[in-house]
Amino acid sequence: MLSRLRRKAPTGIDRVELAYARHYLEAVAERDLRCLLATPVNCGLVARRLASGVVRTAIERWAATSGDLATDTAFAELVATLRAPLHSRPPHRTIGVVEPSTGIADVRAASMQVAAYVQATLRGAFNPWMNRVSGEAFWYVNVSHVNLRRPTRLSWFRRAGLRSMFLVHDLIPISHPEYFTPQEDIRHGNRIETIARHADVVIFNSKVTQAAWDAHAEAKGLARPYGAVVPLGVESRFLLGAEGRKVEAEIPYFVVVGTIEARKNLAFLLQVWKQWTQDGRAPRARLVVVGRRGWENENVVDLLDRSVALAPAVVEVAQLSDVGLTALLRGARALLAPSLIEGYGLPVAEALALGVPVIASDIEAHREVGGRYAEYLDPVDGLGWMVALEEFAQPNSPRRDAMRNRAATFRAHSWQDHMATVEAILADQSASLTPRG
């Protein structure tokens, strides 16, 4: 979370880290809490006051609750684009690209980054026993995959003998290495092995992720600590439902949310969009792609940057605040989630919580999250997706109305629900576990 503090929008894992940090720093302030940071050279503690400042800054930048979007330049540019007529060949432009900034907020975030890394490095060097953090009085909680591929970063942990809980987001780099950079399957295998070696409790975001863990652990002969599925929560702004600010646009639009990478199947969706507008027909609707460009995405980038046929109808937004994203989703004909593989599917839960119809690929993770409230299509059925888009784009679409009525009754898990379940698990396990030494 600290390394991404200068970003204006969080990833899914960023949201999880922020939710846990807020819970332990704010909701249970009376506890003896220690905040640990893995630096480039070691691990060390960060003062609670500094950690609280980091979390406040992340909240301001990522999860601001203000309804005033007047100063959000990316959102304003997006709205202007969606309200403009469709031109035949506008140049492709990505809205909200991160650029160097010297604004007060950016300077404060950068200062906190430096202060935290310096403080943790010095404390780790001169106080390697982590201020006597050890034994049964503490749980070590890790909800990120970051640095777990370097087991030496947890060398202090074995000496301290703490009970520990890790959250596993997915095993996709291991099961589907073709969607990632070379050697990522090996790196992620190291992360999973580190968790298996050190964990007393493993939390999974879905049954899909737990099943993948079980299969991998059995194949590799890894330890099988206590495990439980605890669905991820949805930020409070998404729990406000359909009532609230929304983008008004005469031309219908659909939204897809997530890092632009191969497994998200965006190349397929863009090809469907081209087919939908072939033979000189005007675009039926716009597609808004919300997310940063990731890895192994050359085909998608070529389509976004160079396709003349797609340029009039596809809008790319690199980052958008939660306030802007909720307004965008409320005005959309549907959220599209065409992924080939997922560990969870947080955008599906967020859209349904807002009462927005969802068209998702028919994969296990999406069905686990969306249940009967979303519509599912084969992730490579081009004709099926094209027909759905055509019908959902209509002003009075019976198919869309039916899905919107279902979405209106969806009840998402809140972060309060998630944390209450985790607290109950830790309390139960505290009575039965012997701290590791």
Image: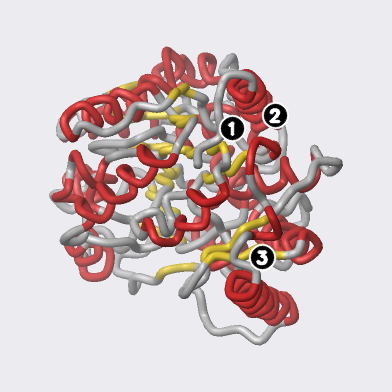
Seen in the image, is 101 located left or right of residue 270? right
Are the two marked residues, 2 and 3, in contact with CB atoms closer than 8 angstroms?
Answer: no
Q: Which residue lies under the disc numbered 2?
A: 416
Q: Position of residue 210 (x, y in %)?
A: 35, 26
Are the two marked residues, 1 and 2, in contact with CB atoms closer than 8 angstroms?
Answer: yes
Crowd around label 2: few <14 · some 14–19 · many ≥20 (10 Å): some
Q: Position of residue 214 (x, y in %)?
A: 28, 25
Name the front one of labels 1 and 3: 1
Q: Which residue lies under the disc numbered 1?
A: 233
Identity of the amino acid at label 3?
Asp
Identity of the amino acid at label 2?
Gln
Measure how far apart labels 1 and 3 are at the Cα level: 26 Å
Position above or below: 81 against 346: below
Q: Is residue 242 visible?
A: no
Seen in the image, is 29 located left or right of residue 159? right
Position above or below: 339 against 75: above
Identify the mark nearer the N-term, 1 or 2. Answer: 1
Q: Which residue lies under the disc numbered 3?
A: 72
Q: Secondary structure at mark 3?
A: loop
Crowd around label 3: few <14 · some 14–19 · many ≥20 (10 Å): some
Q: Secondary structure at mark 2?
A: helix
Q: Position of residue 403 (x, y in %)?
A: 46, 19
The residue that appears at 19% across and 39% down in the rendered structure is 175
